[in-house]
Amino acid sequence: MEQPPTLVRVANHSFVRFDYGSPVADLHWHVLATQIRCHMIQFVLTSRDTKLVESLIDEVSKMTLPAEAGPISGRGGGAVPVCIKDYARDENVLERVDPVFGERKFNAVPVRMIIDKQGKVKHIHFLSAFPDQVKAITDALFQWRFRPCLRDGKPVEVETGIMFGLAPRPAAPPPSQAVNE
């Protein structure tokens, strides 16, 4: 570790900076991390030339970031959807249609979605999926209906995530019973 994690200002916002290096590879890593709304944003800069990396950090500082960016803040609101972790849990789902997969794949499919003020899925973004999974999940999610989210008594748009395609966990084997002979 070349420098312990420290709070720094980049693009007029707070970031956590962590620097470390590998003497064997003669490489240096500089990590800048912050949170914008409900998303972790990281810049990872790697080089043998530390002066080059410092100049790149100076260039990153010229960016414009949303006002709510910060190392431990960023809830959304205003003109953007409110981020709510796990909003797609059972108690908020009024209608659910399961995706129909043609072929079983054993990969997790993380999905971000925006739910409008009426509780309908407005936008879907796939972080990682095969094309057939994208189609099946999209066809299903656009049929889902959610309980509208209220903030100060008024409906608001929500951004949330959900995971599809996880293989079911095997049931725990029953405890072995001793047999008396």
Image (cartoon, grey):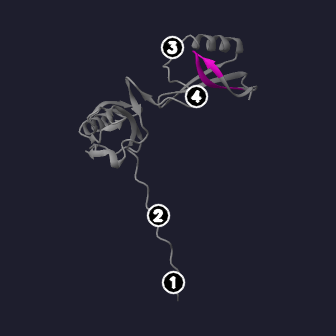
Q: Residue at x 58, y 14 (%)?
A: 60
Q: What's the CA distance linking mark 3 and mark 2?
A: 51 Å
Q: Residues within 10 Å of mark 4 (few under 14, many from 20)?
A: some
Magenta span = 8-20
Q: Amino acid at mark 1?
A: Val
Q: Quadrant of residue 13?
A: top right
Mark 1, residue position: 179
Q: How many labels sit on residues?
A: 4
Question: Circle 3 is placed at which residue position?
Answer: 64
Residue type at the position of mark 2: Ala
- Labelled disc at residue 71: 4
SS at circle 4 = loop
Select label 4 or label 1 by which is in front.
Answer: 4
How far, Cα to Cα, is label 4 from label 2?
40 Å
**Do the residues under discs 3 and 2 have CB atoms within 8 angstroms?**
no
Q: Nearer the viewer, residue 138 or 88?
A: 88
Position of 44 relative to 58 (above/below) = below
